[in-house]
Amino acid sequence: MAEEKKTLLERDDIGRMVSRMAHEIVEKASAPGELALIGIRSRGVHLARRLARKIEEIAKTAPAVGVIDVTPYRDDKLQEQSLPAVGAFEVQVAVDDRTVVLVDDVIFRGRTIRAAMEAVERLGQPKRILVAALIDRGDRELPIRADIVGKNIEVLDGQRVNVLLDEADGVDQVVLTNWQEKNRSI
Amino acid sequence: MRSLISIADLTNDEIEEIFTLADDVAKLRAAKVGAGQIMATLFYEPSTRTRLSFESAMQRLGGSVISCSDMKASSTAKGETVADTAKVVSSYADVLVVRHNWDGAVQAMAEHADVPVINAGDGGHEHPTQTLCDLYTLRQEKGGLKGLTVVVCGDLKNGRTIHSLVYALARFGANVVTLAAGGMELPQYVIERLEREYDYSFAPVASGDLNSVVTETDALYLTPKQPHQLALYTQVDKVIQSQLSSLATGLRYDAFYMTRKQKERMKDGGANASYPTIGPEFLQEKRFQNTVVMHPLPRVDELSPELDKDRRGIYFKQAAYGVPVRMALLEFLSRANRTQRHGAKQASRAYRSPEPIGPKCRNANCITIQEPRSTERRFRIYFADHIGALILGCDYCDHRFKVDYVGNRAAKRYSSFDIAQSATIRDWWGRGELALFDSIKEAEELGYEPTKTSGQRVLMGEEEIDSALAAMSEQILNDCRDPDRLLILGVRSVGSQLAQRIAAAIEARRKRRPELGEIEIYGSGDELRRSSAADPDLGPLSLKDREVVLVDDVIYTGRTVKSALSIIFRSGRPRSVRLAVLVDRGHREVPVKPNYVGKNIPSSEKDRVRVRLRGEERQESDRVVIYSIVNPAVNTNTVAASREKSASQ
């Protein structure tokens, strides 16, 4: 497997991005107390917790953090791009009349966010739903936007962006990997 | 007085109570608990099982039965209303059992009868006693209902037994997998109720997982290419998640519930649609060795005859349980009425129009439309702020629809509904001043005048709209990877008109018309359909691998688009969905973003932006206008008013 790795962002970059994103979230919320962050499994959860800590430093109130697992459903044919996803809450938060921020590491096709949005709707009626992503790699397949973005990265076909975080990977890094098409099957 | 119109009239405990009575019907029979009771059966539609089992049940309880052999030959033929029939017959009998071809007719009869009324099937609405028999059968066969996975197959749209059954299964904590024939999916209002009231979630089931055993006469819709399988889970929890990823081995299915195609409720008799059947392959598959097959009967050819001899084919048993369950039900109702026990239904305040002209149910088969004399126009009102709509639910047939025009009775003013008015409208409703209308004509007929506005400013004229649509059409075509897979989907109603124009522009360039459909965000009809019925042979819209372009007139909070995406993903798996809007007025509340925008128009929250197209009610040209409400109505301490105040400061 011929993989080429390139480090795009290091620990300090990620730290600055998270900090700026936290400020943006606070600005967009009408009151920090009405914020609910929902981390999308798995790296989105770590990011959501980091953002929550930062928001607490800035606004002196810690927002609630929920956890959602969005599993892209794979059918027998593994047509990855055409699959819907199902969202299930692992940690529920109150969403009624709140500003809900869905947090993920990378936003790409928009399918995960759509599934997460639907799951949020089943919890209640938020005032507003925002999306925060550390990396926006474009190429959306659905009309979904990221409201708060750490960095926009253009990614070519056959490349993949990986966000590595201390909590899961022992390192804070954003890595661009070239990978061959034939390795795509999972 | 306790009647049984909907399965929702009974609490879970009461259903258990009926089952306990059914377990020991010999006791009821010996005690002759029905002695001296007369049951009248009024069947406006043919029936064998339901009617005979009810009559047998009453006689076994020691009571007697009167009936009219053919309601069509009764005074109905002379024009008697169901209300009058109910009133008259209730002086001859102690309980009425009614089947009617109109949705909600039995409810109307119960309102006019002086004795309890049991619904033995009303149009495409509900059939609660069948559901009781179904639940009882499942309980007998499987020991309980909680945690069961039941596959409901066939006509899920018109099958009244299905609607009652899925609600009941939801209440008892069973999982439901739907396997609809093409174009006969569970209606939106049923799905909404499952989601909101019973906390159900959808999860996709492996396409083709059931296809090896459930075959179709001409295998059109249930091929792996076009999955029509949808699972409803009480909760998509960890366990379900793991099952989803290992669906290759299949879920544990406890029961298949087959239904007959409800030809009599289809305009064309359903001639073109193919239909799932359970074939002999089912019997051979090991994983179905404990899966029972149920059918409310009569069957046509959905079940292979080999199934009759198999222990898993329990539909005759199911029919046999009809008598004990109905005996138990008759006894339960008679006890409940003696002790004046209240049912499960909570009396929520109904909306009744304060004016003689008001909104009408959109379901053409509803009793309120077929025979308004027997009903009062009574609705449940839902402030569906999450989709920016005001919804009415018919109290008779349960169909729900969006309200178009709202008025204030005291001020005699009307306007088209806008989500910004939500608080004001709640206030009017609280004071009994809320008048709702289906059209401008209705409001004006009653002497209502349009709400005063700031004066309209035209933001886009005809030429500008034309060129915006042309530019958008070109971009859509340029961005399209495979123009043959393009599907232009307009959001009803203005969005579908714009979609037609975009499709025409694309046709002019490509010399080939892209497929065109429309999506109804809230309504009781088909939520997704072809926008022209010119070619009914084409069958239902397919979303699989399509490049969908969703078209709407104005994007505001984005909630409409979000709902449209939910409907789309529930119905298929498109390759992509792009969004085209004529006007983006900002103020997004959900993270959706249009790909194509005709014009960005900054607006304040109290403004209204409307796209008016030629041919619409009183429109002679195409325009986009902006205006704001000056004074929604007299004496109104509204959000809009306070906003205005703060804006002027």
Image (cartoon, rainbow, N blue to C red):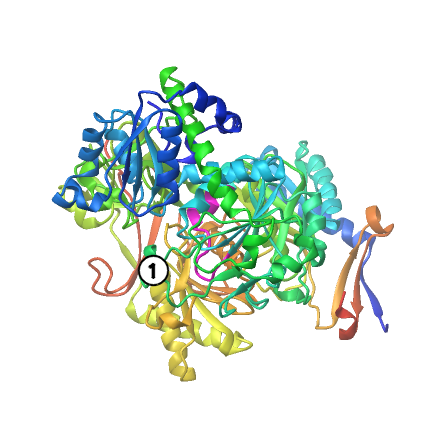
Q: Please give the residue where the numbered disc 1 appears in the rendered image.
A: B494
Give, as a single range, the part of the protein colored magenta: B180-194
**At 18% from the left edge and 36% from the top edge, which residue is drawn?**
B355
Q: Nearer the viewer, residue B579 or B111?
A: B111
**Residue B444 location, x and y as percent?**
15, 46
**Residue B564 location, x and y as percent?**
47, 55
Left or right: where B587 falls relative to B353 = right
Residue B613 vertical placement versus A55 (above, below): below
Q: Nearer the viewer, residue B145 or B578?
A: B145
Q: Quadrant of residue B102?
A: top left
**At 42% from the left edge and 32% from the top edge, which residue is drawn?**
B326
The reply to whether residue B560 is in sight is yes
**At 51% from the left edge and 60% from the top edge, which residue is drawn?**
B277
Q: Quadrant where the N terminus of chain B lies?
A: top left
- Please tell me whether mark 1 sits on a helix, a strand or a loop: helix
Q: Nearer the viewer, residue B462 or B532?
A: B532
Residue B204 vertical placement versus B119 (above, below): below
Please state which amino acid type lies under the numbered disc 1: Val
**At 56% from the left edge and 55% from the top edge, which residue is drawn?**
B307
Q: Nearer the viewer, residue B294 or B366?
A: B294
Q: Quadrant where the C terminus of chain B lies?
A: top left
Residue B339 vertical placement versus B387 (above, below): above
